[in-house]
Image (tube, helix red, strand yellow):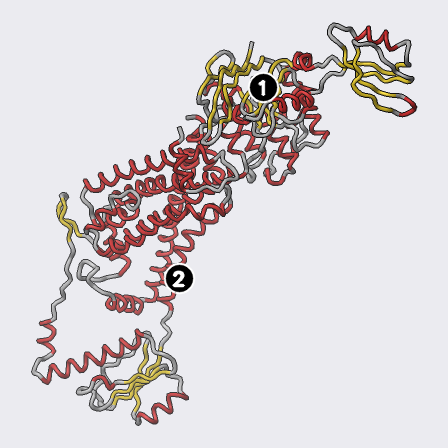
Amino acid sequence: MRNIFLVIKREYLVRVKKRSFLVMTLLGPLLFVGFYATVIWVALGSVDAKTVQVLDESGLFRKEFKDSETLKFRFLDSTIDKAKADFKNGDANALVFIPKNVIKEPKSVRIYAAKNVSMDLKSDIEKVIEKQIEDIKLSEAGITHKILEDSRVNVNSETISLSEEGEKTSSSGAATVIGGICAFLIYMSVFIYGTQVMRGITEEKTSRIVEVIISSVKPFDLMLGKIIGVALVGLTQFILWITLTAGLTSATSAVVSARMAKESPEIQQEMDKIQKGMPRQQMPGGNVENPVSEVLGAINSLNIPLILGCFLFYYLGGYLLYSALFGAVGAAVDNDADTQQFMLPITLPIIFSFVFAQFVLRDPDGTLAFWTSMIPFTSPIIMMVRIPFGVPAWEIALSMVLLVIGFMGTTWLAARIYRVGILMYGKKVSYKELAKWIFYK
Amino acid sequence: MNIIEVRNVTKEYANHVALDDVSISIPKGSIFGLLGPNGAGKTSLIRIINQITGPDKGEILFDGEHLNSSHISRIGYLPEERGLYKKMKVGEQLLYLAQLKGLSQKQAMEKLKTWFIKFDIKTWWDKSVADLSKGMQQKVQFVSTVLHEPDLIILDEPFSGFDPINANLIRDEILELKQKGSTIIFSTHRMETVEELCDNIALIHKSKKVLDGPKNLIKEQFKTNTYFVEYKGELDLLGSDFNVLDQKELENGYRRTNIHLGENVSPNALLMNLLPRVEVRAFGENIPSMSDIFMRSVNEVPEA
């Protein structure tokens, strides 16, 4: 026991003291938060007004195009040919041509621009024209604005999950995001830390220190110590990332909201506009105030302690399962270059589970979701995708038990290969050879 | 009293037998030479004593007890293929290895200080191993082998990679450790080392022990009862008791010849026979070198 502890301590400290660990730990959250902050900043800051010329032959839309923060409209009273010629010399960003018979032929509207027009601009303009034509047609049919307003019903279904604890407002949007993030983190960490275990073992083997070490430590203890040590490195990194990200996020959002407050209400409008462009069905509740608080509200509706607990369990379980296999590969080969041939069968299930995760996100209670969240090789990723959507307790329990059995199995298997492999040099190992090692007495 | 008692140990690998019914006794406080050609099974035996692998048949006694994990901290092992963690610092690494052998951090620190002063390598503490030369790394590894003051020290080719000065340093350390009561097992091909240091030897060849015992007794056993004479003059027939094997011309008219003595003939008889005939410059018994013994034992064993 003492020796396992010593091995764990060494493996942990060697990695945590590395400069690259520090850099990754600091850079990770910075990159993450920096990325989002930049996106928000740019989105808020790019109120670079575009000028749009409108040549409205029908004369129906003059009142409808209203200047906004992003768009300035200028109305022309010339012919289209002249307008086009002038447009080339002018500084306007786009020229909208609405012909006389637009009501009958709505498709005859043209947008001219020096470069391709953005989708936003196009849809903004189309929306205005569509609405006006609609209104005109409706009033021609005798339906007034009043009737129209009254008939407009805003349906926003709230998705409510029925569980033993009673009804709870759920948010499939937030669940998708959280599930996706968890799956991705587990996927990445299994790869990153599993490979670290493999490298570490190959390093001990190629530097030949392994013979000295196993004259003091049982090979199994050495392997296990390494696996646990690296797992703790991963946990440390996660905890630091979560803390730092949380800290940075609150700092950043404070700055952003300060700016929002200063520049509102235009920004607020802007945000609302973005909001309206988004598919509404994901968001619960009808009154939209601000997207940030909405996302936070949605996240609050999830069972965060359960998700965090499961995340830690599945991270550890998945990592233990795979790192044992990575370790066996590291012990079987003489150098990093030879690992390739044995890596494929290990990485395939990880990659597959990540691919399956995309389908499971769409159908978190389907047959595929159920089975892949039971099989230990895929369950760490798939179950984490499903949990934010709500999974029956027995399924989680069964999947956890299977995962524990799974990693005990792979650890046993890896230990058999490991004890033979670490002292085997200069031999190209085949799968047949590995199978033989497993059954050595 | 034997510190190690190997009893009828057999070890088989997938397609060959590494040790075949080998029994060896290693007396406490001796320097024991474990000899044999490459692939004879020396490393297999060493690994079994180190409990890296186990024997298929037979048993090992350590200081009278069945070999078990409590003995690990009483053994120090320097494998032939040296290795340290390349990126780890020398001091940290030695501390780690010492702790694995059961020392507390404090004990290890104290002992390390002594060795660092003794070897005059204080400046290496914070260097990473990769920055040391190969010889320096060997020194570090030697320290790690003996730091916990083991009762049994197993050295596999300890002098390879050392320059003569450092080899001498290590040799003196080995002798000092013996003085302090440690038993040392040498596994080596270098017969001059065996000649110089070993008290007892065992020779393994083709997985079998072919020879073992105290070095002087073995030499006695391998003596051929031949004597050499360096002389000036004509050496004619000495009688049927003396069989002249060969003759070689040396410088300044001297010759050297090897003479085999018959049963129960004393060297004095030969000398008396020689003195009236020739002028004797040197005379002595041909004592077989370890190298001769090695070659003869290995070649005598019939091909399996």
- In the rendering, at what x and y percent does residue A353 appear? 30, 50
The quadrant of the image that shows the N terminus of chain A is: top left
Residue at (69% x, 28% y) in the render? B167
Q: Is residue B173 above or below residue A123?
A: above
Other residues around mark 1 within 10 Å, as few (<14) / some (14–19) / many (≥20):
some
Direction from residue B9 to residue B256 in the image, left or right? right
Residue at (18% x, 82% y) in the render? A133
Check disc 1 and report its element: helix, strand or loop: strand
Rounded to the nearest whole Å, what is the CA distance between mark 2 and mark 1?
79 Å
Residue B101 image label: none
Give the total of numbered labels. Answer: 2
- Can residue B104 be seen from the camera position used here? no
Q: Amino acid at mark 2?
A: Thr
Q: Amino acid at mark 1?
A: Val
Of A44 and A344, nearer the camera is A344
Residue B210 image label: 1
- In the rendering, at what x and y percent does residue B283 appear? 83, 14
Of A372 and B42, nearer the camera is B42
- In the rendering, at what x and y percent does residue B54 appear? 45, 24
The quarter holding residue A41 reads bottom left
Badge 2 and badge 1 in a common chain: no
Residue at (25% x, 79% y) in the render? A126
In front: label 2 or label 1: 1
Of A320 and A327, nearer the camera is A327
Direction from residue B154 to residue A326 in the image, left or right? left
Residue A38 image label: 2
